[in-house]
Image (cartoon, coloured by chain):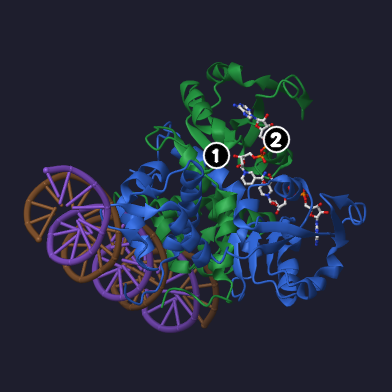
Chain colours: A blue, B green, C brown, D purple
Amino acid sequence: MKFHRIPDETVRRLPIYLRGLLLLAEQGREHVSSHELADILHIKGPQIRKDLSYFGEFGTPGVGYGTKELSDCLRDILNLNCPHKVALVGYGNLGAAILRYSGFRSYGLKITAIFENNPRKIGRIVQNIRIQDVKEISSLKRKKIELAILAIPAESAREVTERLEQAGILGILNFAPSYCIDARSKVKIITIDIGMDLARLPYYLPIKAEIAG
Amino acid sequence: MKFHRIPDETVRRLPIYLRGLLLLAEQGREHVSSHELADILHIKGPQIRKDLSYFGEFGTPGVGYGTKELSDCLRDILNLNCPHKVALVGYGNLGAAILRYSGFRSYGLKITAIFENNPRKIGRIVQNIRIQDVKEISSLKRKKIELAILAIPAESAREVTERLEQAGILGILNFAPSYCIDARSKVKIITIDIGMDLARLPYYLPIKAEIAG
DNA sequence: GTCCGTTTGTGAATGAGAACTCAAGCACTA
DNA sequence: TAGTGCTTGAGTTCTCATTCACAAACGGAC
Ligand SMILES: NC(=O)c1ccc[n+]([C@@H]2O[C@H](COP(=O)([O-])OP(=O)(O)OC[C@H]3O[C@@H](n4cnc5c(N)ncnc54)[C@H](O)[C@@H]3O)[C@@H](O)[C@H]2O)c1
Ligand SMILES: NC(=O)c1ccc[n+]([C@@H]2O[C@H](COP(=O)([O-])OP(=O)(O)OC[C@H]3O[C@@H](n4cnc5c(N)ncnc54)[C@H](O)[C@@H]3O)[C@@H](O)[C@H]2O)c1
């Protein structure tokens, strides 16, 4: 292994590898080859090997990768070895769905604070968490919360992002449209734009007597 | 313009352009330059021009693009000029949130059918739509519905995908983990894997006394 | 201990996409 | 009608990512 910049696409795949390995380990599998992982995850074998090779040599030739071993290493790499508290901003349709979703738990990620705008929601207790006023967002610094999920309308996204930044948040999973977000922010922002993904689906419908061509 | 394969990344950006243009048109803007669009959407100017040039010549030098004009063209390209009915499969946390979301409407996309597994939910009427048994999924063919949103647990995803395929569905927006989906399906499947996106966020936290290096 | 089938790790080749550049085109002015 | 200031469209270059291909490494059989 040599010194390398890690490609973004590689980082994007790491959690997928981790999930696959956890699944296999649960099933009692001790080892797995890159080829078999490839079949399960729909990612090509050489791709998997190269991605992993950026971080070290985890496999043994002729055998494959130890499921338990490699998943531990991936947890280290992804910084998921210690639990992380996550703040949820916006308890609307989407925010409530995400709060009830338990799938993050297995990666040590847990929502422990919720912020709202709406006076009718502030003070309510959901899943043992008291919904706070968004004005109290600076309390995150004290609580050492570094991650946030943003599920508020487009209009407020930019302003709240800035406040989160000032409150010491370092990573944001954002559901507001991408143009709402300050591009030159130091915080790592991952945007999921569900509307845009749905909107490009009709493009692939084969009807198309297309303009192009 | 010459004959070209359209890059996937270009298609991914088209709806973003469309949204930006609709926003500008709403504000009364008649023209916009690629440079200005770039500022708004955080996508570089030359990128925008090249993407658009795959489909034709929409701008006029010295002036820019007509907001109304170009947004109409993009609608054509994306096949959003005629309304599309969408089926929602799985009315749980996420499914309910998506149903209540109105943002798709402006692209002519409307959820008009809902399917469930759970007998306690089947028959209920939400947003004027009667929740049907998932076994009735083949009725989609008759109703000429071609798009579906999949918001069911991982375990059932593969089976239901196959049934959707048989029911004539041509495009799926999938929220179940990617490994659940049959890779060699003819249907266009766009997967949004929220858990994986959140799981890679901690990687970017600057704490990292990293293994690599 | 040696041979054999398997699987890794990685440099080199290929491919895809983004960014750069600039000639050509249009509006506006005089 | 000629000049000026922008802006587009697209060929070229550059960067990043995926795929290929193979030597080296290991376990197990004998
Ligand atoms: N629900 C979906 O399926 C869906 C789909 C695509 C995109 N989105 C995006 O996700 C975001 C949230 O969507 P939603 O459907 O949950 O909206 P929503 O209106 O149901 O919920 C938004 C919540 O945020 C709160 N809020 C508003 N301003 C706030 C502020 N400044 N600080 C704190 N809280 C504030 C509101 O009180 C409300 O409870 C939006 O940006 C939307 O575009 C949602
Ligand atoms: N809610 C979230 O925030 C979230 C986040 C990340 C990923 N996801 C993914 O989205 C999917 C749905 O999540 P959710 O939180 O809404 O789950 P959920 O359990 O709340 O809802 C699932 C719904 O699907 C129904 N269902 C189950 N099997 C079915 C079948 N065969 N046919 C039709 N309906 C069926 C159930 O009755 C239930 O109502 C899951 O794959 C989950 O991993 C959800």
Residue B210: horizontal and vertical position, in percent? 49, 75
Residue at 52% in and 35% down: B172
Specify the quarter for ligand 2: top right
- Name the amino acid, label 1: Leu
- Tell me the chain of label 1: B
Residue A129: horizontal and vertical position, in percent? 83, 55
* Residue at mark 2: C-beta within 8 A of ligand 2: yes
The quarter of the rendered structure image containing the C terminus of chain A is: top left
Residue topped by disc 2: B92
Q: Secondary structure at mark 1?
A: strand
Residue topped by disc 1: B173
- Tell me the chain of label 2: B
Residue at 39% in and 44% down: A42
Q: Residues within 10 Å of mark 2 (few under 14, many from 20)?
A: some
Q: Residues within 10 Å of mark 1 (few under 14, many from 20)?
A: many
Which circle's residue, 1 or 2, is located before the other in the chain?
2
Q: Secondary structure at mark 2?
A: loop
What whole-number distance in Å separates the C-alpha atoms at marks 1 and 2?
16 Å
Note whether D24 is above or below A198 in the view shown. Answer: below
Of the pair B87 and A170, the residue shown nearer to us: A170
